[in-house]
Amino acid sequence: MDVLIFKPAVVCILFYITCFGLGELGRKIVSRFFQPASYPYIFLIEAIGTLQMCTCVYENGLMVKNYGPMGFFFTVTSLLCFANSWNRGAFVSPLAPFEMFFYKSINLGKFLAVVFGQILGGGYAFFSAKLLWYYTKNYSEEHQFALESTEKCVLNFKVSYVFVLLFEAMGCFCIRFIISKLPEKSKSFAIPITVAGFLTLGIVYIGVGGLNPTVAGSRLFGCSGLDTLWFAITYWIAPLIGWMSAAHLIHTGLLKSSGKRSKNSRKPSTVLKDNKSTNKKPSKKGKKKKEN
């Protein structure tokens, strides 16, 4: 077995460990000086989590280059699983916070703290990735290549634009719908697998997948292929429409009809059990009367 095949993976893993380590250090400092329910705490935790995850996204390109879609799928799944335990509740996406604000689960102050935290973290992720690549370029050919190719960002779609737009909208719709159907015990690993699966489908069949306005804005904004307006429509508005469409169907109960039917279908069986139990009781009394 060629040991060199694992070299890019080791480089990427060290990169991810550095991002998570620095992020955890920042979270420790924030937790020391701010109360968890305060707006500064929410803002800073969101900014740190977004900076950490969006910086890792830049390194994902090296995994795709060296190990293909399956390497990307495994990497994204692992990163999201670790993020669930380390990120202190940071969303790293505006979709869920927008839904919560729309349905009044959170107030305007918390929603704005989350959104502005994501803007700050996502905006500085590119500089963070370049900084790490610069100081490791002498030790890694992969980072030397990544640093040299940072200015050559192009949105290469494998399909016509309308399918890209549909993928962003329908992908977010499906993710939100699947999340609503997952058991609570399995969400910690099932959600990362679901998200990673759709992103991998985007790489294989679409070319460039977003499914997250914050990450897409951090990683893809400014790349040639779409102007600012169409970029916003594709990677910001379309995912929001898809996500909120599923959320609307869920909150109005239109996607819960199967669950209600299953509950109703159980009622006859319970009635039968009750009838059996009631039929048994008179028989016992009858036996006692006969004995007497």
Image: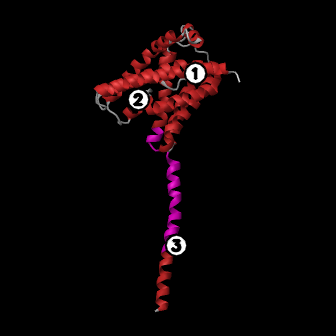
* Stretch in magenta: 248-277
Q: Is residue 81 left or right of residue 162?
A: left
| Residue 266 counted in the magenta span | yes
> In the drawing, what numbered circle is on residue 10?
1
Distance of mark 1 from mark 2, alpha carbons? 27 Å
Q: Position of residue 168 (x, y in %)?
A: 54, 26
Give the amino acid at mark 1: Val
Q: Is residue 75 above or below residue 277?
A: above
> In the drawing, what numbered circle is on residue 276?
3
Q: Earlier in the sequence, mark 1 or mark 2?
A: 1
Q: Are marks 1 and 2 in contact (CB under 8 Å)?
A: no
Q: Position of residue 98 (x, y in %)?
A: 40, 30
Q: Secondary structure at mark 3?
A: helix
Q: Earlier in the sequence, mark 3 or mark 1?
A: 1
Q: Which quarter of the rendering shows the N terminus?
A: top right
Is disc 3 surrounded by few (<14), some (14 to 19) or many (20+) residues within 10 Å?
few
Q: Secondary structure at mark 2?
A: loop
